[in-house]
């Protein structure tokens, strides 16, 4: 984001604060001012009432210690503008004319940031709004310039950052530049995002009682042409990963809704997968069986097809200088290693991480399989590596089949590949990997209060991801240098997070996900 400057500072800040000050709903007439090709569109209500306001204020108390989140954000916004050299009285100068709803659209994406924004704010008094614009222009440290487009007057400045501000009908429009301002005016007079079927179909899935709703045109963001991929810096492998999960990135759209509760914040995401079948499956049991000491973990099911594709691709390309093309699977089969059989037998996958410092970090990828021969393949791979004199490979002792690999590049712990009781694990550190194969009763995630609360918060949605807030913060505190002031300032708010819970479901061509941030009471 560019720094807050000149007459655009407060209106833009107000839009950015939608998620902190108000309650959202499905799209309103504001979408009539967003260009039809908008990549991202966010809309919310600036003046919450009733239960929504109570929930927002309850969250504010838990996270910031403030009794009223709106007042807290206004204080921060005024401080930001003051630091930029142009103080403003938000309550005195802006609140009297500020309307009920606001929205912001972005037309561009440069590979890391959304660009070409336009903000639309409802006003209750257009004359007062215009007076505010004129006042800010007079007080600006940089010369302001007047302009007009399609009968609507606007102001901009001559600084290197040239936002455009003007009243269009009953709305205040703040745009990144003249082109974005003109796009908003053109949309209001002709084709707009609100008229697009792809927008209308997915925005109807926005959650009830939301604080704000965000529409994203995933297809336009990851348009799979080589020209766009190169211009936006997108990784072709990311596009392939999306397709392998059943998502056609060229057609997909999504809406995310922010829903506050008394002791949690929920983000509900619905995605239209462009006519593809939504992925399904429930790996909650595997996730809950991971070690209780995990500060983060996730699990997925039904991924054997993707593993098979990866093996086929590797076999077709070969390993330069080591394995010729189309010889990998054929060469391993006589050694008792059936890669196709292993891939076909895989059922679920999970990963977890443990530790509270760099030295104590550990974790593993855990795979479940229905094929007992896959267990023997792990030992066979270890024997093969030792037979060709790969340095640092040692057979794993004990009841689990497998081997370890020690290498300076891996740090002070070995890479471990092990199998036991229809589980395969590839981990960092022997204790973490062996625990992944068979965690002791009473010492799994499902036995911990935070995980139980996460499962309960998701309701009927199966849990697929979990993070323990205090444990993750302890690790971050140990890893982040004390000189990082940004983290130190954020730490006081991060302390309020008890857990993160992720759940996913699928039905037809619609995939849904819930991300819940549980807060300390």
Image: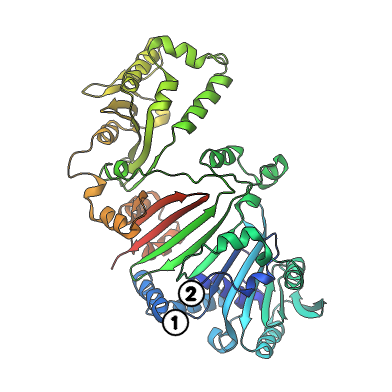
Q: Residue furthest front?
A: 508
Q: Which mark is residue 49?
A: 1
Q: What colour scheme was applied to this rendering of the protein?
A: rainbow
Tell me where residue 298 sits by quadrant: top left
Mark 1, Cα crowd under 10 Å, few <14 / some 14-19 / many 20+, is few
Q: What is the x, y in percent for residue 214? A: 55, 63
Q: What is the x, y in percent for residue 243? A: 56, 40
Q: What is the x, y in percent for residue 428? A: 34, 33
In this figure, what is the number of numbered marks? 2
Q: Nearer the viewer, residue 367 or 271?
A: 271
* Residue sitting at x 28%, y 53%: 451
- Residue 111 visible in the current orientation: no
Q: What is the x, y in percent for residue 175? A: 69, 70
State left or right for residue 421 relative to residue 153. Answer: left
The tag earlier along the polypeptide, 2 or 1, is: 2
324 is higher (above) or lower (below) than 396: above
Tell me where residue 42 sits by quadrant: bottom right
* Residue sitting at x 41%, y 63%: 266
Mark 1 and mark 2 in contact (Cβ < 8 Å)?
yes
184 is higher (above) or lower (below) than 332: below
- Residue 367 visible in the current orientation: yes
State left or right for residue 428 relative to residue 3. Answer: left
For the C terminus, give its image quadrant: bottom left
Q: Which mark is residue 447?
A: none
* Residue sitting at x 70%, y 59%: 37
Mark 2, Cα crowd under 10 Å, few <14 / some 14-19 / many 20+, is many
Q: Distance between the Cα atoms at labels 2 and 1? A: 8 Å
For the N terminus, give its image quadrant: bottom right
* Label 2 SS: loop
* Label 1 SS: loop
Q: Nearer the viewer, residue 517 or 413?
A: 517
The residue that mark 2 highlights is: 23
């Amino acid at each position: 984001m560019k720094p807050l400057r000149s007459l655009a500072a407060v209106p833009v800040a107000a839009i950015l604060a939608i998620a902190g000050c108000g309650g959202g709903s499905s799209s309103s007439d504001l979408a009539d001012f967003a260009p039809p090709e908008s990549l991202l569109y966010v809309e919310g209500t600036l003046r919450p009432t009733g239960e929504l306001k109570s929930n927002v204020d309850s969250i504010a108390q838990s996270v910031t210690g403030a009794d009223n989140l709106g007042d807290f954000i206004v204080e921060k916004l005024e401080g930001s503008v003051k630091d930029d050299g142009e103080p403003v009285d938000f309550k005195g100068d802006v609140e009297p004319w500020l309307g009920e709803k606001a929205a912001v659209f972005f037309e561009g994406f440069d590979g890391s940031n959304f660009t070409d924004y336009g903000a639309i704010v409802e006003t209750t008094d257009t004359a007062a709004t215009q007076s505010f614009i004129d006042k800010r222009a007079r007080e600006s440290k940089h010369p302001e310039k007047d302009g007009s487009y399609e009968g609507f007057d606007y102001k901009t400045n001559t600084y290197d950052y040239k936002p455009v501000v003007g009243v269009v009908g009953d709305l205040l429009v703040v745009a990144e530049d003249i082109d974005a301002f003109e796009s908003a005016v053109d949309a209001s007079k002709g084709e707009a995002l609100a008229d697009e079927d792809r927008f209308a179909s997915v925005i109807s899935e926005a959650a009830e009682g939301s604080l704000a709703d965000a529409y994203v045109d995933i297809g336009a963001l990851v348009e799979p042409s080589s020209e766009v991929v190169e211009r936006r810096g997108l990784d072709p492998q990311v596009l392939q990963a999306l397709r392998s999960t059943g998502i056609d990135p060229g057609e997909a759209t999504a809406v995310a809704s922010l829903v506050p509760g008394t002791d949690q914040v929920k983000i509900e995401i619905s995605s239209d997968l462009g006519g593809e079948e939504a992925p399904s499956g429930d790996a909650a049991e595997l996730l809950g069986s991971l070690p209780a000491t995990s500060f983060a973990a996730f699990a997925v099911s039904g991924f054997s097809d993707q593993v098979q594709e990866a093996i086929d691709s590797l076999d077709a390309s070969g390993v330069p200088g080591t394995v010729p093309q189309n010889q990998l699977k054929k060469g391993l089969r006589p050694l008792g290693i059936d890669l196709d059989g292993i891939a076909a037998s895989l059922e679920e996958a999970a990963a977890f991480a443990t530790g509270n410092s760099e030295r104590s970090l550990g974790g593993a990828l855990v795979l479940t399989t229905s094929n007992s021969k896959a267990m023997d393949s792990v030992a066979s791979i270890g024997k093969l590596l030792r037979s060709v004199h790969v340095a640092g490979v040692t057979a794993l002792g004990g009841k689990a089949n497998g081997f370890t690999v020690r290498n300076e590049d891996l740090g002070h712990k070995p890479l471990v590949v092990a199998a036991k009781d229809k589980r395969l694990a590839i981990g960092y550190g022997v204790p973490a990997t062996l625990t992944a194969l068979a965690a002791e009763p009473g010492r799994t995630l499902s036995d911990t209060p935070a995980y139980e609360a996460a499962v309960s918060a998701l309701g009927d949605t199966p849990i697929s991801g979990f993070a323990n807030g205090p444990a993750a913060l302890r690790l971050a505190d140990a890893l982040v240098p004390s000189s990082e002031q940004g983290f130190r300032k954020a730490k006081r708010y991060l302390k309020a997070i008890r857990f993160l819970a992720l759940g996913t479901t699928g039905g037809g061509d619609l995939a849904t996900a819930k991300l819940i941030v549980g807060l300390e009471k």
